[in-house]
Image (cartoon, helix red, strand yellow):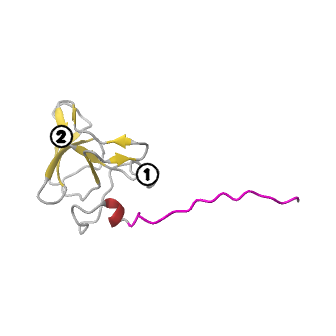
Amino acid sequence: MVECAQHPNADKLRVTKVNVGGDRLLDIVCGAPNCRQGLRVAVATIGAVLPGDFKIKAAKLRGEPSEGMLCSFSELGISDDHSGIIELPADAPIGTDIREYLKLDDNTIEISVTPNRAD
C-alpha cells in the first residue's frame, strides 16, 4: 500500500493507492481498521469473483473512486477472521496471485462418513 489517507467524506473509511505489480497503482477505498501505508495486502481487482459469486466492480464510495477491494481472510473464504485486511509479510512479492502465495491451489476431497453400525 503506497498511500493511505482519511476519506474526506467518511470517518471510518480510508482512500488508498495500492501497487498491484507492473507499476500499476489502483485507488481503493477501504474500511478495515488495520489499513495503513506500507502494508503488503491481498487485493481483489475489477473482474475478480470472490466466494459467494461476489464480483468486484469499479465503484464510487462516498464520492471517491474504488478500483478493487482489500481483502480479509473471511472475504476470500479462507477462515472466519474478518477483523481486518490480510497483512502479508514485507517480503511478499507484489503482483502474485494470493492463492499461489498462500499455496491454496491444493485439491480438496470432502467426504461424509455415514454410520452403518447396528450397535
Q: Is residue 109 magenta?
A: yes
Q: Residue at x 70, y 59 (%)?
A: 113
| Percent x, y of residue 6 | 18, 40
Q: Is 46 or 75 nearer to us in this picture?
A: 46
Residue on which the image places disc 2: 6
Quarter of image, res 92: bottom left
Residue on which the image places disc 1: 77
Q: Is 12 or 64 nearer to us in this picture?
A: 64
Quarter of image, res 103: bottom left
Q: Earlier in the sequence, mark 2 or mark 1?
A: 2
Disc 1 on helix, strand or loop? loop
| Percent x, y of residue 77 | 43, 51
Q: Residue at x 34, y 65 (%)?
A: 100
Three-letter code, disc 2: Gln
Q: Main secondary structure of the magenta part?
A: loop
The reply, left or right, for residue 48 in relation to residue 17 is right
Residue 40 drawn above or below residue 65: below
Label 1: few (<14), some or many (≥20) within 10 Å? few
Q: Residue at x 51, y 62 (%)?
A: 108
| Percent x, y of residue 95 | 22, 61
Magenta-highlighted residues: 103-118
